[in-house]
Image: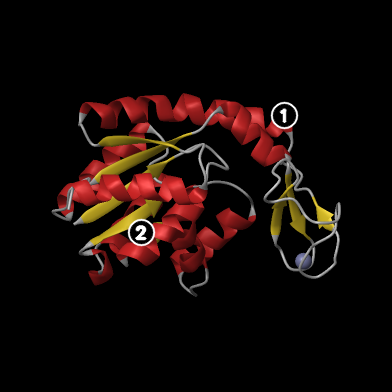
Amino acid sequence: MKNIIFIAPPAAGKGTQSAIIEKKYNLPHISTGDILRDEAKKDSELGRYIREVLDSGSLVKDEITYELLYNRLSLDDCKNGYVLDGFPRNIEQAYKYDEILSNLNQELGYVIRLDIDEETLEKRITGRRICEECGTVYNINSDNEKPKVESICDKCGHRLYQRNDDNITSFKHRYDLYMEKTKPLLDYYAKKGILYVINGNDSVESVAKEIDKVLKEGM
Ligand SMILES: [Zn+2]
């Protein structure tokens, strides 16, 4: 059984690595954000409530998130494990997650922390450029990910733009918040002996290899 949680700062490559594991190990990739968005599409009282909250930009009540997560994790496709993305984000959610798992008769599995230098993240975020037409993502701070012509998409020739929150001030704020919220979470999982720290500064391929080693050891 492979239940995997990723803990990583913004732009650390969590989504990319989750997708790789999903394919390689044939595990569902579960994100609380997706669960809520799916529920919001339903024509039910709960669906309408979530839609309103999401539209207004506020946060859905924790109790509702927990219940929906419980329901999702109890489905058959999670029996052999899953990759959980975006949860738990703080120590309160970690306690709640323990409860959910114990009700499901499941174990924590692996908590994988992607460790990345703040400077590397800053470069990734401030260098990110996105094609306004096809959505391809570039990075002007990386020789491998730069567009061939400045500000122009290699694939479709349209202009590239920078997301509003991809600036240093916003990054610093998100990063500090992440450090503050996850520190107790990491201590908690380290004490349980299931925290694996992976160096996320390397290429996507070598990070994936390191994660592979961790998962294979426990098979
Ligand atoms: Zn394009």
Q: Quadrant of the N terminus?
A: bottom left
Dot placed on the residue nearer the N-terminal end, 2 or 1: 2
Q: Secondary structure at mark 1?
A: helix
Name the amino acid, label 1: Thr
Give neighbour class at mark 1: few <14, some 14-19, many 20+ (Cα, 10 Å): few
The x and y percentages for residue 164 are 76, 44
Q: Is residue 132 above or below residue 170?
A: below
Residue lying at 28% horizontally and 60% vertically, measured from the top left: 73
Instruction: Confirm or reject: label 1 Cβ below 8 Å from ligand 1.
Output: no
The x and y percentages for residue 33 are 49, 55
Numbered circle sitting on residue 127:
none
Q: Is residue 96 above or below residue 161?
A: above
Q: CA distance from mark 2 to mark 1?
A: 34 Å
- Which is nearer the eye, 119 or 206? 206
Residue lying at 17% horizontally and 56% vertically, measured from the top left: 104
Residue 23 lies in quadrant: bottom left
Residue picked out by circle 2: 68
Viewer can see residue 94: yes
- Which is nearer the eye, 90 or 6? 6
Name the amino acid, label 2: Leu
Q: Mark 2, mark 1: which one is toward the viewer?
A: 1
Residue picked out by circle 1: 169
Is 175 on the left or on the right of 192, as rendered? right
Residue 99 lies in quadrant: top left
Residue lying at 72% horizontally and 29% vertically, measured from the top left: 169
